Image (tube, helix red, strand yellow):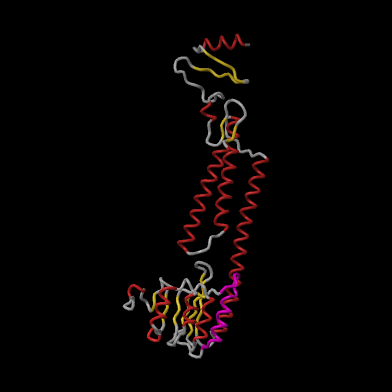
Amino acid sequence: MRARVRQDAEIGGCDRYFCAGKRLVTVASETGSVSPTDPTNDKSRRLIWVSSDGGRPRVHWRRVAAAMVAFAAVNSLGAVINSRVSEMPINVFGIFGPLCVFATYLVLVVELQLQRAQHATWHVRYSLRAMLLMTALAAVFFGAATSAMRANQRSFAVNQTVMDELEAVLTGGGTATISMSGGRCITCQVTRAGFSDDDLGRLIRAASRGESGRCELSTLFLGGTSIAEAGVRQLAVCKKLTFVELPSLELSDEALAGLAECRSLQFLFLDEHRLKRDQLDQLRRRLPKLRLNGKTWSERNDTP
């Protein structure tokens, strides 16, 4: 048989030959080209994630791990940037969802390249290990999606409860809105002249019905109300306040100290003619970024 093969090769004008399994592969002496079906052609086995040097295919696990780490880093950075720009809290599904999709893609690609390296052709076959990995990734993906959906449902239910209590307090004059930018933020505009300190206490308690248990008032219009100094002191627990409008009234040092506890306060509108010079200095020291009646401290004439 070998003599017949040699004779056929010589008749065909080839001076070299070899046998791989049951397939005869010839190399033309004139061009030196290799048959594309040559199983010893290493270039056809050098894939991105899998390689074979004539033996058992080997997965480049370092490349796979590096790809996962790089994707996780880019995905996390994108989630942080999106959270900062949109002022929304980072969603767990926004991180784990893309990671699961990319990991599933890697599993599929590695399995296809393993089949290519083993059989020299593409086969859509998956091992038990790959199927288990994809099942686990699918479970994580749908688990994260379900958790995010339930969190949204709980948040919606809490918002509805808080809104009902706020509307009950504001009956007779006032509006309330809830936004989820940067977490739950509540804006209340009170227009009822008879709104008292007790009503403000009820409003603060209603705004503290969220999951955190902290007051989530961010914007508060009280210019047309009849609250007094005792009501202003209650605002010390509203750490998320960024805007406050107060009616014309005299404030003690204790009331201003309570307002200064709102470190996020950026805008404060009141009758500053009823404040003493040392009280303005106290506000300047405690809240350097505050805009009093729309002006920064550097824009004011009372800066020493």
- Answer with left or right where residue 82 lies relative to residue 214: left
Q: Residue furthest bottom?
A: 194
Asked if 1 appears above or below 166 in the picture, the reply is: above
Q: Say if the magenta span includes residue 208.
A: yes
Q: Residue furthest left?
A: 301
Quarter of the image that includes the N terminus: top right
Q: Say if the magenta span includes residue 13.
A: no
Quarter of the image that includes the C terminus: bottom left
> Front-most of 52 and 10?
52
Q: Residue at x 47, y 84 (%)?
A: 252
Q: Residue at x 55, y 47 (%)?
A: 102
Residue 76 in the image: x percent, y percent? 52, 53
Asked if 73 appears above or below 145 in the picture, the reply is: above
In which image quadrant can residue 274 be found? Answer: bottom left
> Front-most of 160 and 294?
294
Q: Residue at x 61, y 68 (%)?
A: 154
Residue 107 in the image: x percent, y percent? 59, 42
Residue 87 in the image: x percent, y percent? 48, 64
Range shown magenta: 195-214
In which image quadrant can residue 85 be found? Answer: bottom left
Asked if 14 appears above or below 93 in the picture, the reply is: above
Residue 60 in the image: x percent, y percent? 57, 36
Q: Residue at x 53, y 42 (%)?
A: 66
Q: How many marks?
A: 0
